[in-house]
Amino acid sequence: MYDIVKMLHSYWAYLVLLMLVIATFNALIKLFSGKEFQAVDFRISLFTLIVTHIQLLIGIVVFFASNYLSVISDTGMGEVMKNKTLRSNIIEHPITMIIAVVLITIGYSKHKKKLTSKPKFKMLAIFYTLALILVLAKIPWNTWF
């Protein structure tokens, strides 16, 4: 069961990354070109929000289905922090990705409250770009491909 959920988490990450890149560049391009906010822009940002939240839920399942909690209790947090791989998998990756999902959620929520196109794209561009940077920084590239 764990292997299936972990595989789903890895493959769903491709969709998350694709949608986050599309949504970020869509917001940036339309912000700087002065385009009007349309239904397709809303759908892109909403779909990005949805796939990232699904990825977060899958990631939570992976975290608690793994042996990470027993590793922490057996070796202690000090040893986890000394081990680069364990620190990345148990601490850095989950926290960074949670922060990225929070940024996407904030950006999406703030853009809905704006009445005109430029502020809408500005909110999406700022928060989705920050989230994209965090996601790119903490994807475990060496095990992902």
Image (cartoon, helix red, strand yellow):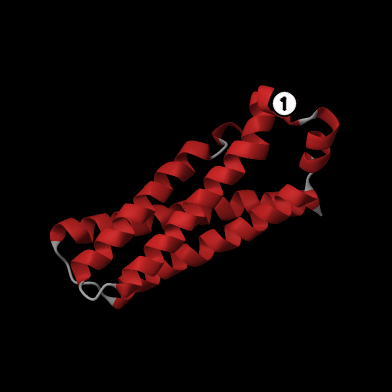
View extreme (left): residue: 34
Check disc 1 and report its element: helix, strand or loop: helix
Q: Position of residue 51 (x, y in %)?
A: 52, 63
View extreme (top): residue: 82
Left-right relation of 12 to 131: right
Look at 66% across and 28% down and name the residue there.
85
Label count reads 1
Left-right relation of 120 to 104: left
In this view, the residue in front, 87 or 15, is: 87
Look at 55% across and 35% down and name the residue there.
141
In this view, the residue in front, 132 or 13, is: 132
Mark 1 packing: few (<14 Cα in 10 Å), some, or many (20+)? few
Can residue 8 be seen? no
Can residue 58 be seen? yes
Look at 60% across and 52% down and name the residue there.
11
Left-right relation of 57 to 105: right
- Please tell me in which quadrant of the rendered image residue 90 appears: top right
Q: Position of residue 68 (x, y in %)?
A: 77, 40
Q: Position of residue 120 (x, y in %)?
A: 27, 67
Q: Position of residue 44 (x, y in %)?
A: 38, 67
Assign the C terminus to one quadrant of the image: top right
Assign the N terminus to one quadrant of the image: bottom right
Look at 68% across and 54% down and name the residue there.
60
Residue that carries the numbered disc 1 in the rendered image: 78
Name the amino acid type tagged 1: Gly
